[in-house]
Image: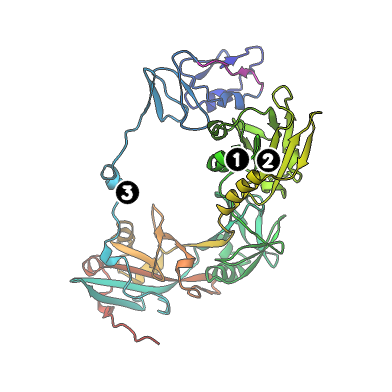
Amino acid sequence: MNVNNDKCIGCGFCVRDCPVDAVKLVKKKAVIDDHGCSHCGVCLRVCESEAIAADENMPQNAVECDACPIKCWINAGYIGACHRYRNDDGTLVRITPLHDFQDVAPIVGPDPKEVIRKPVVTAIGSGTTYPDCKPAPRILKENRRGIDVVTVVTEVPLSYSSIIVKVDTDIPLGREGDRILVAKREVGMVETEQYGSKMLHIGGVNRLTGQNGFVVARTITDIANRKAVKLKIENGPRLLIQVGRPPIIDSQAAGKMRVGCGSATMGLFAPLLVEAADEVIIIDSHITGQMSRHVAGQFAGAKATGVRLKFNESTPGRCFGDHGGGWGGTSITDPIDIIDSIDTDIAWQGMTILLTETTGQNGTMLELDGSGQLKEIPITGKARAALEAISNSCEPSRVSAIYTAGAGGSARAGVTKYPIRLTRAVHEAKAHLTVGGSPGYVLPGGGITFLVDVERVKAGSFYWTPTPATICPLEYTMELKDYEKMGGHVAAMKPYKAQKPK
């Protein structure tokens, strides 16, 4: 990397963001260590005054790393931008050695013993401990392969509760932080997106204890029980969501979930796409892929086309998109608008361009004529086959949800005389927490905060009460000896007798 001292304003962004600490400020001017520099391009992208330029030729003793799209040039004795690889005398070496599971087993920690992984009985229909200082409504014991096992169950009211709704779609639902409304009352907000999914977070203690607490509690419960729920996103669409079904967005059912971002789609289908057209552009709101410049396209045999896109390029063939109601969730409503320019010294007459999205549901084929203009042509058989391969690899759009709550409060008194011992037993996997029989994931740190997939809990098992709070069927299962050690309510314990089927 080269610095133009006349342009450098000493802002320090290149120093702050350099992943290998190869940039320093000397007399308020950037100075780059050529040996330590990995040529990752971060300084180029953050320089406010465009004072930094990239070298065109790789240093003689450097090795190009192909572990990611950055393709660092790593000099002998130095590391790449990700700090994973080092150049040892011309050979790239992974710095961290390969670990067997036994190497990390103490860190991973134990699983619950098989004998306690399933509750003796679920808490569905068990009744609620209230006040919590009395024993839970059901404390049942059975002998499993010579080991006495206890399950303590209760349908516990939880003010610290919410539901995270995952909507598998590329259709924009709103900006992060936008409010979610039910009948004009706020119940949640739009969360950060996940891969191919929009995330909605509904509830939480601050909303449950606020002025809209009743509708918040009802909404959480209805979603958890897999009922259809109408939502409105602030500055966004109206939704009809139901766990296990496609979302209805502004009265239209969503079809497909993306197979991957534009770059990942290029990596998955590059051999097919090279056969489909001379250039392929996969339009995506996050990372738009361009075949001729993408490492996967070049690996599959694509050649330079001279096409430049309007979106800013992150690494070759990977461009950061924008958001809107157009193709791939971008602002592009006419796919040809994604093309900023074509270098006619590189392009050729008859060159074909295929434009599509990450779901492959829409496609347009263009051809460059003798006057340097693009015209739309019918999609060829090979291009159609590539689009169908992408589309057929996509999963259907659907709604799923994770109920999350904190059970580390007073409800523990119904389980044991010493609440902290129950908390520790749960985190040490000596007591196994389940929700309606489904295993919960307990978050690390203090307390007992858990997550559960509502589709693994019997529909109709969640309730709400106008305190307001949601009510969740919760089970703790452990060996009798561990229950006794934690000060469990042994006197209230009864042998389990299987009920006759109704």
* Rendered residue at 61%/55% (across/down): 169
Q: Is residue 475 above or below residue 359?
A: below
Label 1 and label 2: CA atoms lie apart by: 9 Å
Mark 1: amino acid: Leu
Q: Secondary structure at mark 2?
A: strand
Q: Is residue 230 above or below residue 271?
A: below
Mark 2: amino acid: Leu
Label 2 and label 3: CA atoms lie apart by: 47 Å
Residue 354: numbered disc: 2
Label 1 and label 3: CA atoms lie apart by: 42 Å
Where the N terminus falls, by quadrant? top right
Residues tagged 1 and 3 counted as in contact (Cβ below 8 A): no
Is residue 56 a member of the stretch shown in magenta?
A: yes
Residues tagged 1 and 2 counted as in contact (Cβ below 8 A): yes
Q: Is residue 325 left or right of residue 382?
A: right
Q: Secondary structure at mark 3?
A: helix
- In percent of width and height, residue 341 lies at 74, 30
* Rendered residue at 53%/32% (across/down): 299
Q: Looking at the image, can residue 284 be seen? A: no
Mark 3: amino acid: Val
Q: Looking at the rendering, which quadrant does residue 320 occupy?
A: top right
Where the C terminus falls, by quadrant? bottom left
Residue 201: numbered disc: none
The disc, 1 or 3, on the residue closer to the chain's N-terminal end is 3
Neighbour tally class for label 1: few under 14, some 14-19, many 20 plus, Cα within 10 Å: many
- In percent of width and height, residue 323 lies at 68, 45
